Amino acid sequence: MSVYRTRWLRFLSILIVFSLLIACNLPQNTINFWVEYLTEPFADSNVAKCKEEGGVWDVHTEKCIPLSTLPSVVPPNKNDNLDPPPPEPLPDEESDAAPLLALDEELPGDVTMVGALTVRLIPLDVRVLDNPPDTIAIAQYSTTPPPANVIIESAGGLWKSGDGEKIALYGGGDWISATCSDQNVTAVGVRFESDENDGWVRVLVDGAEVWQGSIYGGNPGSAEGMFLYYLEISGLVPGVHTIKVENLGINGKGGGDDAAMRYFGFSSTPVSGYSP
């Protein structure tokens, strides 16, 4: 017997049974039960036919939907839910501690460039280095006279320490200068040793300003509560040069405007290792 003939016989059977159920005036829920029971084979056959034709049976609309009309679904990447790789570890930061010094190494300190000149604040007493300045001139020149090749001049009031070396410029406009007559000088400098009473100064070389700043010595962490730096200016053309320190009359954080220093230095090569 063919499939189509079998289906027609089932349909006629269901139609006859359905008519009898209505004629017997049965409750509605009983009728619904028998309708679902008798039509189930047709539903199954429709689902099977839909699958054979390559479609999907929609149970809500009771229709066969061809696969070609369904939206394509991209399978998820198996790596989508994986955690991102950890960041690369950062290299250890270089220590800013002062290195052990050698003749061919640069000394620690803040560096700025003024034209062709290198200006560096070196947090050391450069007299103790293996390559100190060629010539040292003590700032308290009236007590400790400078070498024959250096002339020191000053204007205004000077404070003098009891050790015969340090001086301080008292007020704005006071200055002190040192000139070395050697023809091979390419670097000059001044050693500041100031405390919480000190303020702002400017430094000139051969009449041109090369540095300006506060030499207040009361900052937390400063050695002995002092501003202890050698300011070196290198890169000069070999010859005779003059370094001058002028008190600007501007108070530091402590309310004072003194400007204290210990000595001047003159070199044919910079102590900081910078070439002219």
Image (cartoon, rainbow, N blue to C red):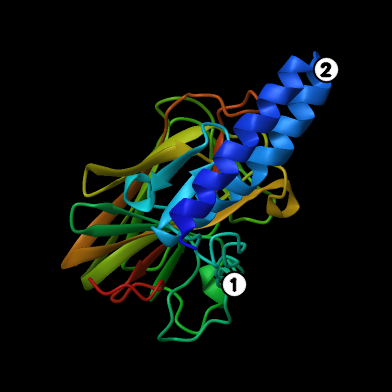
The answer to which of 82 and 78 lies nearer the viewer is 78
Say what secondary structure mark 1 lies in.
Answer: loop
Q: Is residue 197 above or below residue 3?
A: above
The answer to which of 113 and 148 lies nearer the viewer is 113
- In the rendering, at what x and y percent does residue 18 appear? 68, 27
Three-letter code, disc 1? Asp
Q: Residues within 10 Å of mark 2 (few under 14, many from 20)?
A: few
Q: Residue at x 44, y 44 (%)?
A: 64
Residue 33: quadrant of the picture: top right
The answer to which of 134 and 217 lies nearer the viewer is 217
Q: Residue at x 55, y 24 (%)?
A: 251
- In the rendering, at what x and y percent does residue 124 appear? 57, 65
Three-letter code, disc 2? Leu
In contact (CB < 8 Å): disc 2 and disc 1: no
Instruction: Indicate which disc residue 199 carries.
Output: none
Residue 263 seen in render: no
Q: Residues within 10 Å of mark 1 (few under 14, many from 20)?
A: few
Q: What residue occupies the far top of the structure in this picture? A: 25
Residue 106: quadrant of the picture: bottom left
Q: Quadrant of the C terminus?
A: bottom left
- In the rendering, at what x and y percent does residue 241 appear? 23, 58
Q: Residue at x 18, y 52 (%)?
A: 115
- The reply, left or right, for residue 49 in relation to residue 96 is left
Which residue lies under the disc numbered 2? 26
Q: Residue at x 28, y 54 (%)?
A: 113
Q: CA distance from mark 2 to mark 1?
A: 89 Å
Instruction: For marks 2 and 1, give the one nearer the viewer.
Output: 2
The answer to which of 98 and 123 lies nearer the viewer is 98
Q: Earlier in the sequence, mark 2 or mark 1?
A: 2
Q: Is residue 67 above or below residue 25?
A: below
Which residue lies under the disc numbered 1? 92
Q: Is residue 156 above or below residue 136?
A: above
